[in-house]
RNA sequence: GUCCCCAUCGUCUAGCCUGGUCUAGGACAUCAGAUUUUCGAUCUGACGACGCGGGUUCGAAUCCCGCUGGGGACGCCA
């Protein structure tokens, strides 16, 4: 039996929430760091609210984050007879009583429950504060606290790493372990993730599902890196950390006690850090579907060309949405001028003529030679002939072709837009 | 309301356990400068925190107490 055996126990009554994902991550890191096991248990006792689509989504998100689990996946819905057996035992011993069709645990009075928490140290509470606990509901299904205790003991879980919000459950569960004559595991309660208003992060704060972030073009490494930084620090002023190094350095003891506010700016920054070093093919596979979805390109869009585009933009965007916004002019058929751009840069008759002449030059370049270097050479010599200042032409050129004043280096942009569109945009000024 | 948890820049944090090296370090964000055909990236710099009050001590961000503030839990949900 492994020295460390932890579990992640999601309930398939909703999508995988960032907070839950972080809990899973810390469990996983602890297991991997200690050479232990990471078990997945599905808490699907609520048959009405549990949905297959949620389960699939949770599993999918975990895999996407790289949080692989060991052994079989346990389902509480398949273990009802076990809970029943233990409930009957407590009934026989007089530690529980029937309440209608339900079975409730008689909470002993006047006892002091004290346990050592790996992040909070000592936590104490008097059982006078606790009420009797329903173990088996009238419909025969177990309650959370009961099933949780039975399963954690039965599956030989050694450490329970979960959110702070479970602290009040812990003394109740402790009393259950005691009544059942079972050895309680060790506990670590991690501080919660809060929204900007300091309330527990929830849907009203915006996107909270891991799958949403995936869809928005965040990379799993970045999300993992961000989540781990919420409450933990590698030390030495390090921030970017992932993979084996993260596993090696992780320690539950250095997890902080302070709740932290989710900050999308920092996530965006981390994502952009990972983007610039990411495998270009993978990056294309992640971003391209979003463009197709946005209706900007067809699925058969040339991948080589797309890779060039990604290369051009990779230090300029932080997620898929951001990329789409900044690159749309490359894919659209016509230029959509930003407010006032045309008036400000292209109203001058002389500049219009110059740009049209330049279009003529471009038209003379062979399709296969229409690359950044050639375009720049052609433009530079054209500039010399016309006798205009470089930037007096380049800037209007950018606006004419992109519709905006901001873009990657203009000659690279011209190349990826393609000769046909460039000539068309310039000559139809 | 009751019980529990928590408290360093706007945000994430280092430092706290083992008091002095802390005129408190880093990162995001913001602002300014350099660079650039624009933006970005990059580099420089600026702004910016130990919640308050008592102790203990020669000395406290660090230890103790109180207060205040924030959060969480009080379901036959999980």
Image (spheres, coloured by chain):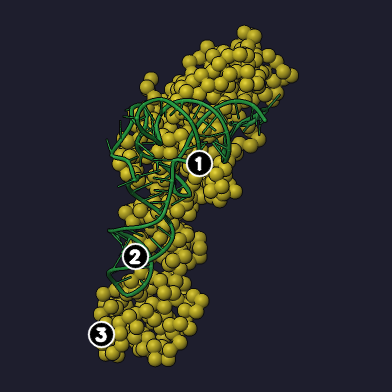
Asked if residue A15 can be seen in this view, the reply is no
Residue at mark 1: A193
Between disc 1 and disc 2, the foreground one is 1
Looking at the rendered structure, which numbered label has been put on residue A359? none
Pointer 2 or 3: first along the chain: 2
- Gap in angstroms between the C-alphas marked 1 and 2: 35 Å
| Disc 1 and disc 3 in contact, CB within 8 angstroms | no
**Looking at the image, is A393 positioned above or below residue A194?**
below
Q: Which residue is drawn at 52% across and 43% down?
A: A194
Secondary element at image label 1 = strand
Q: Which of A79 and A180 is in front in this view?
A: A180
Task: Look at the image and tell me in which quarter the C terminus of chain A lies.
Answer: bottom left
Task: Identify the chain drawn in green.
Answer: B
Secondary element at image label 2 = helix
Pointer 1 or 2: first along the chain: 1
> At which x and y percent is residue B38?
36, 72
Residue at mark 2: A312
> At which x and y percent is residue A16?
52, 41
Pointer 1 or 3: first along the chain: 1
Task: Identify the chain drawn in yellow.
Answer: A
Within 10 Å of disc 3 (Cα), the crowding (few <14, some 14-19, many 20+) is few
**Looking at the image, is A176 positioned above or below residue B14?**
above
| Disc 1 and disc 2 in contact, CB within 8 angstroms | no
| The furthest residue to the right | A100
Within 10 Å of disc 1 (Cα), the crowding (few <14, some 14-19, many 20+) is many
Q: Residue at x 70, y 23 (%)?
A: A138
> At which x and y percent is residue A175?
56, 17
Secondary element at image label 3 = helix
Horizontal side, residue A104 vs residue B38: left or right: right
Residue at mark 3: A381
């Amino acid at each position: 039996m492994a020295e460390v055996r932890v579990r992640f126990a999601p309930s398939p009554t909703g999508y995988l929430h960032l907070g839950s994902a972080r809990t899973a991550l810390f469990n996983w890191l602890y297991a991997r760091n200690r050479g232990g096991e990471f078990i997945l248990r599905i808490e699907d006792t609520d048959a009405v609210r549990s949905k297959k689509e949620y389960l699939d989504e949770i599993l999918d998100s975990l895999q996407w984050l790289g949080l692989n689990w060991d052994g079989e996946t346990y389902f509480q819905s398949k273990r009802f007879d076990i809970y029943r057996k233990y409930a009957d035992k407590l009934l026989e011993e007089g530690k529980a009583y029937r309440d209608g069709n339900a079975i409730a645990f008689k909470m002993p009075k006047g006892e002091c429950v004290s346990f050592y928490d790996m992040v909070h140290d000592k936590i104490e509470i008097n059982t006078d504060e606790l009420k009797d606990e329903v173990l088996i509901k009238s419909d025969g299904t177990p309650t959370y606290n009961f099933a949780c205790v039975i399963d954690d003991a039965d599956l030989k879980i050694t450490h329970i790493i979960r959110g702070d919000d479970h602290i009040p459950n812990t003394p109740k569960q402790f009393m259950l372990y005691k009544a059942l004559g079972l050895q309680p595991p060790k506990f670590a309660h991690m501080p919660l993730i809060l929204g900007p208003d300091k309330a527990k992060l929830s849907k009203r704060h915006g996107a909270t599902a891991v799958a949403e972030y995936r869809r928005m073009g965040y990379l799993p490494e970045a999300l993992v890196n961000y989540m781990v930084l919420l409450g933990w620090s590698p030390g030495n002023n390090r921030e970017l950390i992932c993979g084996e190094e993260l596993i090696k350095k992780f320690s539950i003891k250095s997890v902080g006690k302070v709740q932290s506010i989710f900050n999308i700016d920092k996530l965006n920054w981390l994502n952009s850090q990972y983007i610039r070093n990411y495998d270009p093919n993978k990056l294309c596979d992640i971003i391209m579907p979003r463009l197709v979805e946005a209706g900007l390109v067809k699925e058969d869009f040339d991948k080589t060309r797309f890779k060039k585009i990604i290369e051009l933009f990779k230090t300029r965007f932080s997620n898929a949405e951001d990329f789409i916004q900044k690159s749309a002019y490359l894919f659209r058929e016509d230029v959509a001028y930003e407010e006032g751009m045309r008036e400000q840069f292209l109203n001058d008759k002389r500049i219009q003529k110059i740009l049209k002449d330049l279009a003529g030059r471009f038209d003379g370049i062979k399709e296969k030679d229409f690359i950044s270097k050639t375009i720049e050479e052609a433009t530079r010599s054209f500039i010399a002939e016309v006798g205009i200042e470089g930037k007096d032409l380049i800037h209007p050129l950018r606006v004419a072709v992109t519709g905006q004043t901001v873009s990657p280096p203009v000659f690279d942009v011209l190349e990826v837009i393609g000769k046909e569109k460039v000539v068309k945009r310039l000559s139809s000024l």
